Image (tube, grey):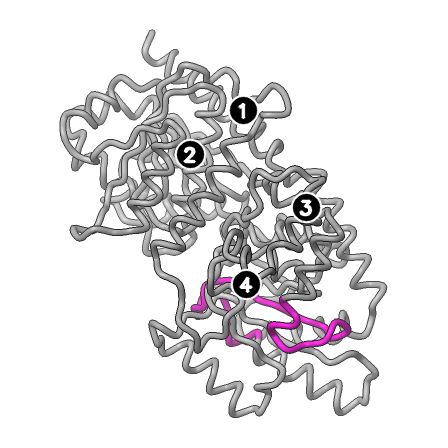
Amino acid sequence: MGKPANAWMGMQKKKWSLMVLALFSLSTAMVFFMRTAFDSCNANTSSSFEEGRDRASEVVHSAGRAGSGGPSPLDFMKSKLVLLVSHELSLSGGPLLLMELAFLLRGVGAEVVWITNQKPEEADEVIYSLENKMLDRGVQVFPAKGQKAIDTALKADLVVLNTAVAGKWLDAVLKENVPHVLPKLLWWIHEMRGHYFKVEYVKHLPFVAGAMIDSHTTAEYWKNRTRERLGIKMPDTYVVHLGNSKELMEVAEDSVSRRVLREHVRESLGVRNEDLLFAIINSVSRGKGQDLFLRSFHESLQIIKEKKLQVPSLHAVVVGSDMSKQTKFETELRNFVIEKKIQDRVHFVNKTLNVAPYLAAIDVLVQNSQARGECFGRITIEAMAFQLPVLGTAAGGTMEIVVNGTTGLLHPVGKEGTTSLRNNIVKLATHVERRLTMGRKGYERVKERFLEPHMAQRIALVLREVLQKAKSRTNS
């Protein structure tokens, strides 16, 4: 879920107030939000086609307009042929990030070809919608197999392989042509889980032009794990932190928009303006730590009651629910809430690809991903753009985003972290000025290093070096 939240594309800032107000009229509410954005989890969710259409539109407008305000650091990619290979085409973070790169490159005049390695046999409305959005932006979409894919890979100036799993495409399709492509291949890796370290996925990794990874922590993990488990060496590795889009920043920086969104979301949840909302915004799964968050939240309520602390009413919001799948884990979460009798304090919200309204409505973001944490965690920088302090696990990319004690508070992963998280919830509930100061400091940090132009500049440096390597290897 820590995915791009750019639902407000194409609007000039001077129109924000009127457009946001119009948003909530009965006749125009459907323009900007997916139908279920504010529904309870017991309501029917919108169709996958609607989700795919809306999300694809967000990505197109967010990335496709990059550089419109002046020269782009990617201008040197003009007329270059770039092949992008994704292991799948879905609404998850990896494919959507690759789509952003596709539109950034198209925006400077590069010729971009997209290949999806794994597609379901049956028709998929999300894939259909995303592919058509790419075609609308001038991205060519080719089949993963066949001579056309091979010829494009051989002819391309640059090949970007997205995620470790996409490595299977090399031998399956290119076969004896693999050695000709590796010198110009950039491998963009987002995974943090051990089961991705398989020889069939990454055996060609040492021979590519470079690997691009979203955080230093993840890069170090890949370096050590590939050496210790597989006995292979990582290629030159580049760390590229992500950035917030211009459109998201416009919403975050418009006080009228934020106020209207805050009022509407809180009304839909049944909470008051003065109540304190702590939200976790991720797909509901054990690895994202919603269970540990709710345990900490419940304990914080007990402490406040026992110590008779004078604080506003606290609420927890879990954004990313999907009871249509009736997962065992989500059932556990709901049973815990019922068992502890905190139904009036915990709110489950359906999966939504438009998280900006919730960022405007809450007071604190909880980033509670477990084990090795998030590879980066884009929702964290999005929350900081809305001047929200972050309570995050001291793991993964979160440690490179959140400055502990300044823009938020970190706690250990696992069950041992629940006590720290509980205490941090109480701290921010009882210290208003500290909470607000952390939010402001987080916003300043975003402005300094986590904007779309920052990301484009970082990617440009990588692409330029990879192209130079490919050229030198070709000439040698």
Determine the CA span between mark 3 and mark 2.
40 Å
Identify the amino acid type marked 3: Trp
Task: Looking at the image, tell me whether mark 3 or mark 1 is earlier in sequence order.
Answer: 3
The residue to which callout 2 is attached is 211
Q: Quadrant of residue 84?
A: top left
Q: Is residue 11 magenta?
A: no
The residue to which callout 3 is attached is 16
Circles 3 and 1: CB atoms closer than 8 Å: no
The residue to which callout 1 is attached is 461
Task: Looking at the image, tell me whether mark 4 or mark 1 is earlier in sequence order.
Answer: 4
Which circle, 4 or 1, is nearer the viewer?
4
Task: Looking at the image, tell me whether mark 2 or mark 4 is earlier in sequence order.
Answer: 2
How many badges with numbers are in the image?
4
Which circle, 2 or 1, is nearer the viewer?
1
Callout 4 secondary element? strand
The residue to which callout 4 is attached is 281
Identify the amino acid type marked 4: Ile
Residue at the far front in the pictured view: 27
Please state the extent of the stretch shown in magenta in the rendering: 265-293
Task: Looking at the image, tell me whether mark 2 or mark 1 is earlier in sequence order.
Answer: 2
Identify the amino acid type marked 2: Ala
**Residue shown at 78% from the left, 52% from the top:** 440
**Residue shown at 28% from the left, 32% from the top:** 141
> Left or right: 175 with respect to 107?
left
> Left or right: 141 with respect to 186?
left
> At which x and y percent is residue 319?
53, 67
Determine the CA span between mark 2 and mark 4.
29 Å
Callout 1 secondary element? helix
> At which x and y percent is residue 26?
55, 62
